[in-house]
Image: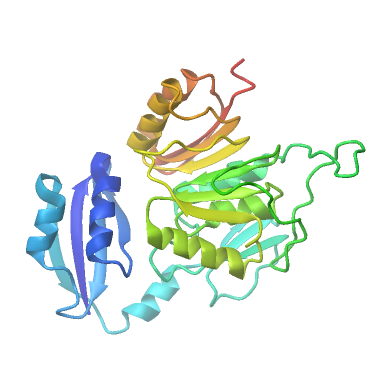
Amino acid sequence: MLRLAIRVPREQAELVLAQIIELAPAGVEEVDVDEATVEYAVYGAPGELPELPDLRAAVGELLVDVSTTEIADDWADRWREFHRPLVLGERLSVRPPWEPPQRCAIDLVIDPGRAFGTGAHATTRLCLELLLELEPPLAADPQGGAERPAQPAQGGGAETGAPSHAQPGQADGPRACVDLGCGSGVLAIAAAKLGWQPVLALDHDPLSVEATAQNARVNAVEGLVEVRQLDLLEQPVPAAPLVLANLLAPLLLRWCEQLRDGFAPVPGMVIASGLLVGEADAVAAGFAQVGLRETRRMVGGEWAALLFDGAAGR
């Protein structure tokens, strides 16, 4: 088995990834090399991997380095050992399907079979920790009485909430949530289990859309999580009371520009991650320009996640 690795500048990583996925649709591994460089890797037998001329044509001048290494025959077993359960206290766990259920109120099963991960990366973990600190807003009683809080589903069993009645591509209602850059769907599914409903999961990558939809079915939130493709550079992000945005800093700043220019509606709250500690202040300043004030910051290693609140900015 061979591993083909492509290193590119971090600020262009999302654009390069879109090109690489077209050449390697079975999945791409992402590795943080340093603050300036991201490595994408694909695996396969000789003759199955993309040709170097195709890679150079797709990535062009952004290509930093290409390397091919031979890996041991037991790489698949070692890959499974790498994906361990993520346990956040007694409230939430995220595990691959080959690991036994965890003793948590919410036990999510996420298959990383296409290299999207199971939530253990610091950026996803920080998002989940901030999400756990939030309480979904009160929802109107369908019988016309006083408002009542959302009731999140417990454990990995069937979801008890009613299916979403939001229109396709919308995130309507006081408890609606958008997961922008959903990947394998960890954040979207966790939000649905915690009472944010409906949840709209968006990603530019069709493999992410497929993986999120499959994981939503496995975790019994299929009726509460809608998944579709969205190109953040070309299409507006729907408004919602809460947006989860685990994206690289350049994409977060581009979104801030769109919010400022009126291209996209300003959400109520944002949990932003995927940014290095040194990038956090610039991202916070960008969101502040549209009335979203930073109210919480969490740091894990070299990564940071920020909570922004529109109400706090008024």
Check the image and report above or below for 115 versus 266.
below
Q: Report whether 258 appears left or right of 272.
A: left
Residue 164: x %, y % from top left: 68, 52
Q: Report whether 171 appears left or right of 252.
A: right
- Name the residue furthest bottom: 73
- Name the residue furthest front: 167
Residue at image point 52% right, 28% down: 265
Residue at image point 26% right, 46% down: 15
**The C terminus, quarter of image:** top right
Residue at image point 65% right, 72% down: 101
Q: Is residue 36 visible?
A: no
- Which colour scheme appears in the figure? rainbow
Residue 231: x %, y % from top left: 37, 44
Q: Report whether 2 appears left or right of 180.
A: left
Check the image and report above or below for 113 versus 129.
below
**The N terminus, quarter of image:** bottom left
Q: Report whether 129 appears left or right of 279.
A: right
- Name the residue furthest top: 314
Q: Choose top left, top right, bottom left or bottom right for residue 116.
A: bottom left
Check the image and report above or below for 204 versus 280.
below
